[in-house]
Structures are given as structure tokens and as C-alpha cells.
Image: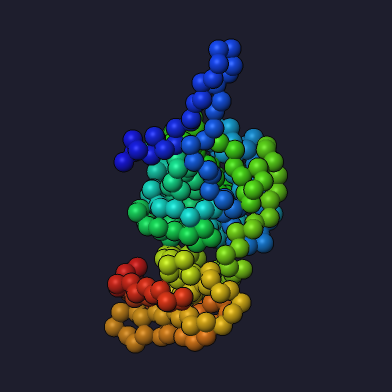
Amino acid sequence: MRISRLARGAVALAIVAAGVLAIQSPAAAAPSFQLPFPCGQTWTGDSNDSSAHVSWEIDFNRGSTAYADENDTVLASAAGTVDVATNQGSINGYGNLIVIDHGGGYYSYYAHLTTMAVVIGQSVLRGQVIGGVGNTSKPGNGISPHLHYEVRYPDRSQSHIIKSVFNGVTFPYTRGSVTSNNCATPYDPREVCGAGYNNIDSVKLGSAGTTNLLWSSSAGQNCVVTLKFANVGSATATSAFLEPQGSTRTTDSGNFSYYAGPVKRTAPGCVKWGGSTGGSSYTSGFEHCG
């Protein structure tokens, strides 16, 4: 499988008449990448003083203090399949790392996450929650929370990091502020659930939306929000539910324009959760225990 991806991502060479240079072009068009943060948020990126010190990667922050961005929502910058979702701190310093394979040889990297809301092999939509901004890294490597972001092409080699493009515009290296147009939904699940809730799981509902599970350690509660990505602004059947193991289910269901929920329940043990929109639905098993 890796060989076929490399073949698709290889640079096409057109050898013309003697004395004329070879023409190089990508074998596949790049995905329509958006900033990996919720709609309307403005983040400042820096590639000069970044944690990995490699050309074209970006470290993002937006807060005025060192820990202001911790747990802020991170979104998939384009649709694809999760290729990596694991802690790699002792291996390469990326800490909790998610890599999304977008096809055609393009990969996006999201490092130092405090939480990961997706798993390896999961298909994700552009704009879907994948985790939270954090400072996970190598043991003893004291870094402040930020999102380390990269795009690689035509494979996952570190020497193949390329310039990031958001909403059709190349990031203004080495430093610049960018406002997110990752606007499949205008809502951030953390803002819908309220202060103290952090993203821990997210599942797409076809192409019509996502259902998201959040947790507040201070409140001892889970929260479920189903966000619409299709028919946004029009009232259509949408639902969200949460069921602590050994207890009854609580559901928010109706014709909603933007989202269902938030559904909050105290959950000291395992929970079953999910939602529906656009004719697609998801129901988990009992999970996220303790």
C-alpha cells in the first residue's frame, strides 16, 4: 500500500528536447486545506522559532499567556484517514501526534496535543474535531502549549515538509496571523458545552456532520454535541444522546438549525454516546470508563 501511495505522489517528469530542463509537477492536486482551528478564530504561526526547527513547519498560538491555548480545539485541516494517533514523545518529541492521510501523497501533522479525539484508521471530515492544543513532548522537555503543524508531500519523510496553504493562500512565512475559514460549522463543541469541557472523541456522520464527546474533570461530567455540516441554518432532524452505564439515557432530539445538545450527565464510569443528522447516526459501546 505504501508503494502505491508513493507512486501516486511521485513527481511527474517531462523530458523534452535536449538543453531544455525537465518540468516538474505534482502527480495529484493538493487538498483544499483550511486552518486547523474553529471558524473565525485568529491564530499566529511561527516557523522561525518553532519547536522542531525544520523549514515550513508552523507552531500556532493565539493566547496572551503561556497556557492560554491549552485544550483549545484542533480540527482536521482537510478530509482524510487517520494514519497516526499515538504518543511519540520518547521517539521524536512530537508527544501526542495525529497524522492524517489525505490521499495523493499529502499528509498533515498535528503534534503536542493534550487530547486525541480520533483513532488510527478513522475517516474524518474537514473541520472535524481531532484533539486539543497541548504541550506533550519528550520526558523533561518543558514546552508551553501550542499546535505544531506540518504538511508533507509526497510521503511522510521529514525532509518532505512543504509550505502550508490555508484557504488557497500560502502561509506568510516565517511569521503571520491567519483567521480560520474552516467553517463547515460555525460552532466549537467546547464553547457549546461550556467552560472546563475538553474534546475526547469525535465521529463523523456521513458527510452531514459530527457527533462529539467532551469531558469535564472538575464537574465529573461528559457532554455530547452533534454539529451539522450540511443544511446548516435550516431546521432538520438532529440528535445527541448520553447514557452513563447503569443509568437511563438522556437525548436531545428535534429539528435543529446548527446542532443538537449539549447533553450533559455525571458519569463516574463508562458511557454510551452518539447522535444523528442527515440520515446518518452513530451509537458507541460503553467506553471512556473512569
239 on left or right of 122: right
Q: Position of residue 51 (x, y in %)?
A: 56, 38
Q: Position of residue 166 (x, y in %)?
A: 62, 49
Q: Which quadrant would the C terminus be assigned to in this image?
A: bottom left
Tell me what residue is drawn at x 68 percent, y 51 percent: 178
Residue 193, image quadrant? bottom right
Number of numbered markers: 0
Q: Position of residue 265 (x, y in %)?
A: 43, 81
Question: Against 181, is 138 above or below?
Answer: above
Tell me what residue is drawn at x 48 percent, y 30 percent: 12
Q: Nearer the viewer, residue 87 or 67?
A: 87
Q: Position of residue 209 (x, y in %)?
A: 49, 69
Does residue 168 show up? yes
Question: Against 192, is 174 above or below?
Answer: above
Q: Nearer the viewer, residue 69 or 129?
A: 129
Residue 59, image quadrant? top right
119 on left or right of 254: left
Tell me what residue is drawn at x 49 percent, y 74 percent: 225
Q: Which quadrant would the N terminus be assigned to in this image?
A: top left
Does residue 66 show up? no
What is the basis of the colouring in this image? Answer: rainbow
Tell me what residue is drawn at x 38 percent, y 39 percent: 5
- The residue lying furthest to the front in this view is 17
Question: Against 260, is 229 above or below?
Answer: above
Q: Nearer the viewer, residue 238 or 66?
A: 238
Question: Against 152, is 206 above or below?
Answer: below
